[in-house]
Image (cartoon, grey):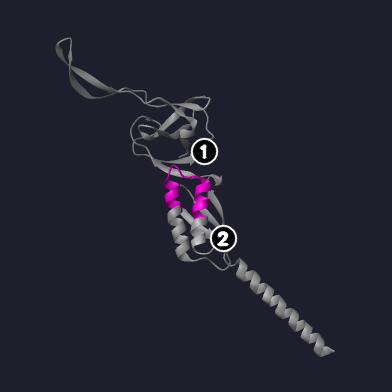
């Protein structure tokens, strides 16, 4: 009778061991990947007890860094890119994105070009933009302009699906002169550069300047 009990115990131990092995094997390639960024740097962390391949982590880090710097990327597109990379290594992952602004808050680096926002922002100044469609009058925003690509301006008005953006620098800049014939008289005409104020679709706004 005692021998029979030991046999039963042994079988239960073997069964539990087999079930544990199957569970471990099935979950070894399932993990949560956390992408942390401050807009200028990216780190990748895995919750897996078993660890993940360094080559996969490095590929994710490089892709996430490129995505953070891309004005067209979104939280969802970054998560999708991380999942796509993981599948190439036979991993199934959940992705969390964290920044200094919270979970699923995506910052982007940018550099000011020009003097249109002086004295608030200077030419060559590095800034951080929080990608969001939630902005209000008075906010500094980065937006896509059909002629000048990315511009940084202040929100002056919002009307329907349009937003009016203005330059802080209201001075007219003299950029040179050119010769013109006016009423048969040759004259030197001053070329002036006026501040760029423009209406744009609200969807063109990339985000709000935070730093």
Answer with mark 2 or mark 1, whichever residue precedes in sequence: 2
Residue 195's x, y, as percent? 35, 25
Majority SS type along the magenta span: helix
Identify which residue is drawn at 52% across, 65% down: 52
Q: Nearer the viewer, mark 2 or mark 1?
A: 2
Reading the image, the residue beneath label 2 is 92
Q: Nearer the viewer, residue 123 or 152?
A: 152
Q: What element carries label 1?
A: loop
Hey, which quadrant is residue 172 in on the image?
top left
Asked if the residues shown at circle 2 and circle 1 are in contact, with their CB atoms under 8 angstroms apart, the answer is no
Q: What stretch is highlighted in magenta?
A: 64-82
Hey, which quadrant is residue 47 in on the image?
bottom right
Q: What element carries label 2?
A: strand
Q: Residues within 10 Å of mark 2 (few under 14, many from 20)?
A: some
Residue 91's x, y, as percent? 54, 63
Q: Is residue 182 left or right of residue 16?
A: left
Residue 144 numbered mark, or none: none
Q: Residues within 10 Å of mark 1 (few under 14, many from 20)?
A: some
Reading the image, the residue beneath label 1 is 132
Residue 32's x, y, as percent? 57, 58
User: In the rendered view, would you say 60 is above or below 148?
Assistant: below
Q: Is residue 2 left or right of residue 50?
A: right
Q: Is residue 196 left or right of residue 3?
A: left
User: In the rendered view, would you say 122 is above or below 41?
Assistant: above
């Amino acid at each position: 009778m005692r021998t029979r009990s030991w046999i039963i115990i042994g079988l239960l131990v073997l069964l539990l061991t087999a079930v544990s092995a199957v569970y471990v094997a099935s979950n070894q390639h399932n993990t949560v990947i956390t992408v942390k960024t401050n807009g200028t740097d990216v780190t990748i962390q895995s919750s897996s007890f078993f660890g993940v391949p360094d080559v996969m982590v490095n590929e994710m880090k490089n892709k996430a860094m490129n995505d953070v710097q891309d004005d067209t990327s979104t939280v969802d597109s970054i998560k999708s890119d991380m999942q796509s990379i993981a599948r190439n290594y036979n991993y199934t992952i959940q992705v969390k994105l964290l920044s200094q602004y919270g979970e699923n808050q995506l910052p982007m680096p940018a550099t000011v070009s020009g003097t249109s926002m002086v004295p608030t922002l200077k030419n060559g100044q590095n800034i951080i933009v929080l990608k969001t469609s939630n902005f209000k009058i008075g906010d500094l925003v980065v937006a896509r302009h059909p002629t000048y690509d990315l511009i940084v301006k202040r929100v002056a008005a919002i009307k329907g699906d349009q937003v009016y953006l203005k330059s802080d620098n209201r001075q007219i800049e003299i950029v040179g002169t050119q010769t013109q014939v006016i009423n048969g008289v040759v004259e030197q005409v001053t070329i002036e550069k006026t501040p760029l104020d423009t209406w744009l679709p609200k969807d063109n706004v990339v985000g709000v300047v935070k730093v």
